[in-house]
Amino acid sequence: MNLFQRKTRILLVCTENICRSPMAEGLLRHYLQQSELRKTVEVSSAGTRCSMPGCRPDQRAQKVAAVRGIDLTGIKARRVTERELQRSDFVFAMDETNMRDLRKLCPIEHHDKLSFLLSHQAWQPMVEVPDPYFGSAEGFARVFQIIEDAMDSLIAYIGSRTE
């Protein structure tokens, strides 16, 4: 990477930034460390609503991630901003509601950056990552697996557009 080359910025977005997007952030960072993109990509997450800014990820999300060797403790909930959407190269939404909120906040000339996290897997019939917040620990494990299954395709998508 050229010393003056800006890193590619990736933003993962859910509603409160305490369940899905922190799990996705932790997983993507982990998988990027094993790829050619590890030094050229910057990953963060945010929420479209984020009623608890500064809060750590849900304990169930932290637990399921820790069991798989993914550390979420450094992540704190925050709300996505218009400026961040402008500065990001890729913005991945977890569900339709998140996408609708992002389209309202994001200037129209940046809408091409917006996509669903799961939309880059040809074989994936799901478009939305279900919100596990009101469910059980098993629901968090299932959502973690859905997000993890998307990582290879997501990294390939990012890589094909940053070369």
Image: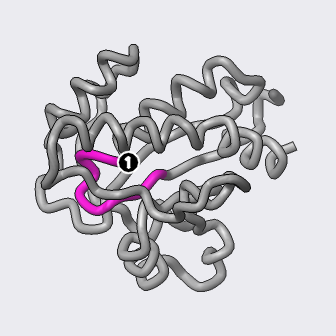
Q: Position of residue 25 (x, y in %)?
A: 44, 38
Q: Position of residue 109 (x, y in %)?
A: 65, 81
Towards the viewer: 84 or 16:
16
Give, as a three-letter code, the residue at label 1: Ser
Is residue 120 shown above or below 115? above
Is residue 111 shown above or below 144? below
Residue 7 magenta-drawn? Answer: no
Q: Quadrant of the N terminus?
A: top right
Task: Using the rendered view, name the quadrant where residue 72 is placed.
Answer: top left
Residue located beneath label 1 in the image: 21
Towards the viewer: 43 or 153:
153
Q: Quadrant of the C terminus?
A: top right
Task: Using the rendered view, name the quadrant where residue 122 is placed.
Answer: bottom right
- Number of numbered discs present? 1
Q: Is residue 35 visible?
A: yes
Badge 1: how crowded within 10 Å, few (<14), some, or many (20+)?
many
Q: Position of residue 101 (x, y in %)?
A: 38, 78
Q: Which residues are magenta?
A: 12-20
Is residue 93 shown above or below 147? below
Is residue 163 shown above or below 66? below
Q: Is residue 150 left or right of residue 79?
A: right
Q: Is residue 87 left or right of residue 27?
A: right
Residue in the image at 28% along x and 51% along y: 17
Towards the viewer: 103 or 134:
134
